[in-house]
Image (cartoon, rainbow, N blue to C red):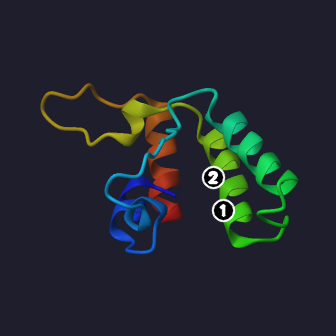
Amino acid sequence: MRKSQELSDPNSCINRSAPEEMVFVLTSRDAAAPHAIRAWVDERLRLGKNVPGDPQIVEALECAATMEREGRVPNALRHVGQDAEPRTDWQQRVYDEIDRER
């Protein structure tokens, strides 16, 4: 889930967590994130907490795939302003793809 969606959705994981509950966030900048997500999915399935078709599992696997497809592109994801460096061609292509997905 994109950060903006996570924060604006009242039913998101972050918004449903208790104020003092520990949370851990993975971002697409982290090369280990897709692997960590898939390991989490494997463990949820092993523990019997989910089955493969559960929406939570499907969303997690789609997130991992999107992270891999888009790569680690923090500059492409930030807003280009006066003090930001211009986007490279590949960054602009990724940014355009993200806009099309919205």
Q: Residue at x 68, y 43 (%)?
A: 37
Q: Amino acid at mark 2?
A: Cys
Q: Amino acid at mark 1?
A: Glu
Q: What numbered label is drawn on residue 59?
A: 1
Q: What numbered label is drawn on residue 63?
A: 2
Q: Work out how far the residue at label 2 is from the one at label 1, CA to CA, in angstroms.
A: 6 Å
Q: Vertically, is 9 above or below 27?
A: below
x then y, percent, for residue 52 = 85, 64
x then y, percent, for residue 50 = 78, 65
Left or right, 81 with respect to 63, comes to: left
Q: Badge 2: how crowded within 10 Å, few (<14), some, or many (20+)?
A: some
Q: Vertically, is 21 above or below 16?
A: above
Q: Residue at x 22, y 29 (%)?
A: 84
Residue closest to the far left: 82
x then y, percent, for residue 100 = 50, 62
Dot 2: element = helix
Q: Residue at x 59, y 34 (%)?
A: 71
Dot 1: element = helix
Q: Vertically, is 76 above or below 2?
A: above
Left or right, 15 with respect to 46, comes to: left
Q: Vertically, is 23 above or below 83?
A: below
Q: Residue at x 53, y 37 (%)?
A: 28
Give residue 80's quadrant in the image: top left
